Image (spheres, rainbow, N blue to C red):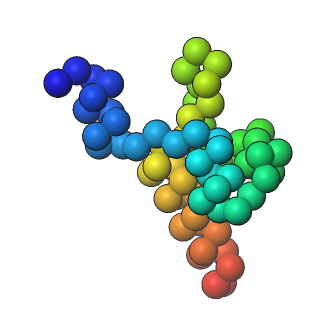
Amino acid sequence: MNAAERLSKNTPLLKVSDLCEMLSLSRSKVYTLIREDKLKSFTIDGARRIHQRDLDEFLEKHRTAATT
């Protein structure tokens, strides 16, 4: 198993369009969250990706903030 296969099995990578659908947010809102460093992301040859764990962290921060 190569590194890419291990990464895709252990840490799903999401596209911006995936987040838009999952969170019912516009594409521009997702990019705003990324630009403001509220949501971690990275690019691979120009393709923006978000680790599932980074999305989970983002959601947990917002869940905690909403309840306090």
For the point 60% across and 74% down, which residue is it? Answer: 63
Near-viewer residue (2 or 37) = 2
Whether 49 is drawn above or below 60: the answer is above
Whether 64 is drawn above or below 44: the answer is below
Query: x%, y% of residue 45?
Result: 58, 15
The C terminus appears in which quarter of the rendering?
bottom right
For the point 64% across and 19% down, which residue is it? Answer: 46
Q: Is residue 36 visible?
A: no
Near-viewer residue (8 or 64) = 8
Whether 54 is drawn above or below 67: the answer is above
For the point 46% across and 49% down, which residue is it? Answer: 52
The N terminus appears in which quarter of the rendering?
top left
Whether 60 is drawn above or below 11: the answer is below
Query: x%, y% of residue 36?
Result: 78, 44
Would you say 19 lies left or right of 51 here?
Answer: right
Query: x%, y% of residue 17?
Result: 65, 44
Q: Residue furthest left?
A: 1
Query: x%, y% of residue 61?
Result: 59, 66
For the point 27% across and 29% down, which residue is it? Answer: 5
